[in-house]
Amino acid sequence: MMTKCTLYPHLAEVDQQAQEMFFRLVDEIAMQEGVTEQLKATDQMEWVRRMNNIQNRATEIVNSKLIYAGQYKRSVSEEI
């Protein structure tokens, strides 16, 4: 990939996919567990604790499914 000058675009694409997956997972898990703005307004420390826990879990999921396992979506140009 280095000789074809495709490494950095590939890494940028994987990074973008990882970020999108992370934010989607955080939103989905927070919604499932009832971590809302209402909780944030009434008990900030509980909200922070739960959001940190959710973010840590989302990071582990992204790392295991996307980064370590390499299950990222290949761009069309790479498949050709």
Image: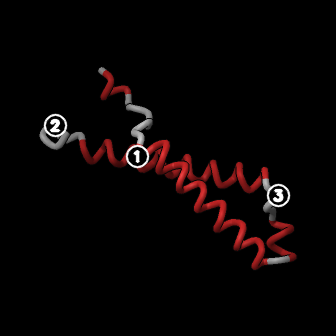
Which residue: 63% across, 49% down? 25
Quadrant of the drawing holding the C terminus: top left
| x and y percentages locating residue 79 in the rendered image | 33, 23
Q: Nearer the viewer, residue 41 or 66?
A: 66
Q: Which residue is mark 1?
A: 68
Q: Nearer the viewer, residue 40 or 77?
A: 40
Element marked by disc 1: helix
Asked if the residues shown at circle 2 and circle 3 are in contact, with their CB atoms under 8 angstroms apart, the answer is no
Q: Residue furthest left?
A: 3
Label 3 amino acid? Gly
Q: Which residue is mark 3?
A: 34
Mark drawn on residue 4 = 2
Mark drawn on residue 58 = none
Between disc 1 and disc 2, the foreground one is 1
Element marked by disc 2: loop
**Mark 2 surroundings: few (<14), some (14-19) or many (≥20) residues within 10 A:** few
Looking at the image, residue 78 lies above or below residue 23: above
**Mark 3 surroundings: few (<14), some (14-19) or many (≥20) residues within 10 A:** few
Which residue: 58% across, 62% down? 56
Q: CA distance from mark 2 to mark 3?
A: 47 Å
Label 2 amino acid? Lys
Asked if the residues shown at circle 1 and circle 2 are in contact, with their CB atoms under 8 angstroms apart, the answer is no
